[in-house]
Image (cartoon, rainbow, N blue to C red):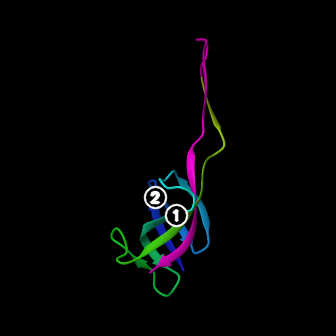
């Protein structure tokens, strides 16, 4: 069975036992988080919600909070002597899907 959830303005296809990195969520390591489900499939006919499937949810456990690799943003304007280098590390939350309630 699989489900589609939305968090951080992005949609993810998840299955029980899968791990994924999403935009940073509040919660310490070991905390449980519940998400509404946009679509449920895998056991017969898929069910779609408008916007969420009634009575369906996905439970996840927070494995870690961290930051991705640094990306470098470089700007330059030719013949003007303008150069700028900036780095950014996006924070994330790593989740493990523990249960899909359909």
Looking at the rendered image, the disc whose residue lies closer to the viewer, 2 or 1, is: 2
Between discs 2 and 1, the one toward the N terminus:
2
For disc 2, the marked residue is 7
x, y percentage for residue 21?
A: 58, 57
x, y percentage for residue 63?
A: 60, 60
Q: Which mark is residue 64?
A: none
Residue beneath the point at 53% across and 82% down: 42
> Circle 1 sits in a helix, a strand or a loop, which is it?
strand
The one nearer the camera, 88 or 75, is: 88
Q: Is residue 29 depicted above or below 49 in this figure? A: above
Q: Which mark is residue 12?
A: 1
Residue beneath the point at 61% across and 65% down: 19
Q: Is residue 6 left or right of residue 85?
A: left
The one nearer the camera, 46 or 87, is: 87
Name the residue at the top extreme. 80
Residue beneath the point at 57% across and 73% down: 15
Q: Is residue 80 depicted above or below 67 in this figure? A: above
> Circle 2 sits in a helix, a strand or a loop, which is it?
strand
Residue 81 figure quarter: top right
Task: Identify the magenta region.
Answer: 76-102
* Majority secondary structure in the magenta region: strand
Q: Is residue 24 depicted above or below 53 in this figure? A: above
Residue beneath the point at 60% across and 40% down: 89
The one nearer the camera, 42 or 32, is: 32
Quadrant of the snapshot with the N terminus: bottom right
Determine if the magenta segment contains residue 82.
yes
Mark 2 in CB contact with mark 1 (< 8 angstroms) = yes
């Amino acid at each position: 069975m699989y489900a589609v959830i939305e968090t951080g303005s992005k949609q993810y296809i998840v299955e029980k036992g899968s791990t994924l990195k999403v935009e940073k969520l509040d919660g310490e390591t070991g905390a449980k988080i519940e998400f509404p489900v946009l679509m449920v499939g895998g056991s017969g006919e898929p069910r779609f919600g408008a916007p969420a499937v009634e009575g369906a949810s996905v439970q996840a456990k927070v494995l870690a909070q961290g930051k991705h690799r640094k990306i470098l943003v470089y700007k330059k304007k030719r013949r003007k002597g303008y150069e700028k280098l900036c780095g950014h590390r996006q924070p994330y939350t790593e989740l493990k899907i523990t249960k899909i309630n359909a």
